[in-house]
Image (cartoon, helix red, strand yellow):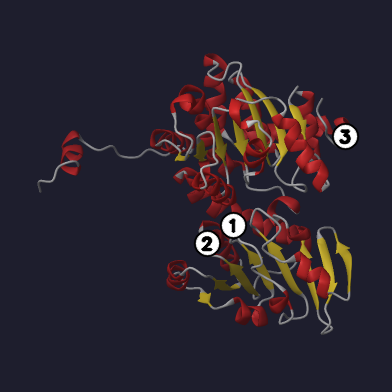
Amino acid sequence: MPRVKDRKLADKGRLKIEWAKAHMPVLSSIAERFSKEKPLKDTRISACLHVTKETAVLVLTLREGGAEVCLSASNPLSTQDDVAAALADEGIEVYAWKGMSEEDYYGAIESALACNPRITMDDGGDITVMAHEKGYASNIIGGTEETTTGVIRIRSLANEGILKYPLIAVNNAETKWNFDNVYGTGQSTIDGILRATNIMIAGKWFVVAGYGHVGRGIAMRARGMGAKVIVTEVDPIRALLAAMDGYIVMPMKEAAKIGDIFVTATGDRDVIKAEHMSLMKDGAILANAGHFNVEVSVKDLELMALSSREIRENVKEYLLPNGRKVYLLGEGRLVNLVAAEGHPSEVMDMSFSNQALSVEYLVKEGENLPPKVLPVPRDIDEEVARLKLRSMGIEIDKLTSEQERYLSSWRG
């Protein structure tokens, strides 16, 4: 049986899903084809994803293809309870509610795995890791992974010879990370900060830790709102790119003295810790855009603070020994999903279209693929781009046969 916060919220959730679907034309076109062809007939899928209105459109698309989907949350605070209720009303086995305890969270993932899936869908690696740890992996023919953090974790499984089934790194598709990670996270992170704090961005020092695709998108949006942006990095190439893009680059110990707003986007732990917090201005704001709540050391903050209090929804104030106060947003979890609604539907349209088409590919080919981390097939990536351009009314040129021959020849 589904476990959600309140089934009475279903009507509100249905309206949210309707709104998202109207802004996801690529996934909607895939759903139309799936409904006719039923390429996922009788396929059980266990998914660990953020339970949002966009995820609901994906899950219902998979069902149109004939799949049975069991869904758990990929973050204890990111579930939209009305959407979860609407999915439960649609007959989806969903185990998710906002504010889950750690025990509830992992219990929900195991409930999704108890459906005995043939395919897993993951956002952060938790369901993939549990499938391997608890003996569910032997019946699984393939899986997908949505995020940078998850791909890193699953590559570790593969490198240690533990991974038992092929895993498609949806995160690494060009139509995912060049758009979802950059434009989606950039906009939704700023949205989360603003909803939580209602502060002015313009004129403030805005520190972005990490200059991968996510950090780049956040820095771009912060600068667009008038912030003075500082980037911190450990990778010399990314640091150089940030400098060439016009940002100030410096170590976190130096940035800590200057910043008004700090956002972590590295995928690593302890990026901001006690030694940095003790240097911060009174009123500094800390937020995280990485998958797990380890980038800002909440443990350090709790240990060093003289007192703390919830001053606004999703804003916790910490009084430090030096008399200054710092503010942590959303418990250090994904600020765009805890304090806002996550990425815009238009960009998730591409990410989740890659998911749906990758699942279709795994149903056809999974048993013939090696147990490795694999890229999204290029034809799927390009098809998503073509469908998105068509939905935007954009046409592009095509190579002539002579141009194709020229590009494939060593002759000048």
Label 1 packing within 10 angstroms: few (<14), some (14-19), many (20+): many
Residue 225 location, x and y as percent? 61, 66
Q: Nearer the viewer, residue 161 or 99?
A: 161
Residue holding disc 1: 186
The amino acid pointed to by label 3 is Asp
Mark in the foreground, 1 or 3: 3
**Location of residue 15 (image quadrant):** top right
For residue 101, above or below residue 231: above
Mark 2 vs mark 1, CA separation in Å? 8 Å
Which mark identifies residue 242? Answer: none
Q: Nearer the viewer, residue 178 or 154?
A: 154
Mark 3 vs mark 2, CA separation in Å? 38 Å
Query: Which residue: 42% across, 35% down?
Result: 377
Residue holding disc 2: 216
Q: Earlier in the sequence, mark 3 or mark 2?
A: 3
Label 3 packing within 10 angstroms: few (<14), some (14-19), many (20+): few
For residue 409, above or below residue 313: above
Whether residue 198 can be seen here: no
Residue holding disc 3: 6
